[in-house]
Image (cartoon, helix red, strand yellow):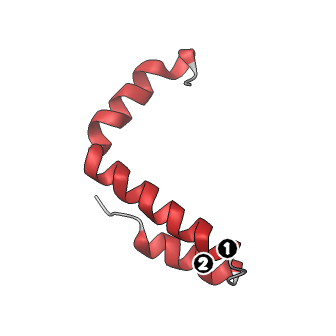
Amino acid sequence: MTNVDRHSALRDHARRFGVERSAGVVAALRSATDRLKRNANVRLTLEVLMLDLPHP
């Protein structure tokens, strides 16, 4: 589901981001979610998430 008004911008972002980088973001988000479900410290979890996100 996408915002029709932003379709071309979203397509451009998707091209630049790529599949591998997108998969890395999803993996980092899932890991952070799992940590939070196990009652990890929110602030530390978010800091680790920022470090785990793929860099350009």
Instruction: Check if mark 1's residue and mark 2's residue have beta carbons within 8 Å.
Output: yes
Instruction: Using the image, tell me which numbered label, if any, was put on residue 36.
Output: 1
Mark 1 packing: few (<14 Cα in 10 Å), some, or many (20+)? some
Q: Residue type at mark 1? A: Leu
Q: Earlier in the sequence, mark 1 or mark 2?
A: 1
Density class for disc 2 (Cα within 10 Å; few <14, some 14-19, many ≥20) is some
Q: Mark 2 belongs to which amino acid?
A: Thr
Quadrant (top left, top right, bottom left, bottom right) of the N terminus: top right
Rendered position, 3 above or below 16: above
**Image point 28% across, 58% down: which residue?**
56
> Percent from the top left, x then y, of residue 32?
56, 70
x 34%, y 63%: residue: 54
Image disc number at residue 26: none
Secondary structure category for the residue under label 1: helix
Along the viewing direction, whichever of 50 and 45 lies nearer the viewer: 45
Residue at the image position 73 percent from the left and 80 percent from the top: 39
Task: Between residue 6 and residue 23, name the one nearer to us.
Answer: 23
Furthest residue toward top: 4
Residue at position x 55%, y 15% in the image: 4
x, y percentage for residue 31? 51, 69
Q: Is residue 35 left or right of residue 42?
A: left
Q: Quadrant of residue 44?
A: bottom right
Tell me which corner region of the image, top left, top right, bottom left or bottom right, holds residue 34: bottom right
Measure the C-alpha gap from mark 1 to mark 2.
7 Å
Which dot marks residue 45? 2
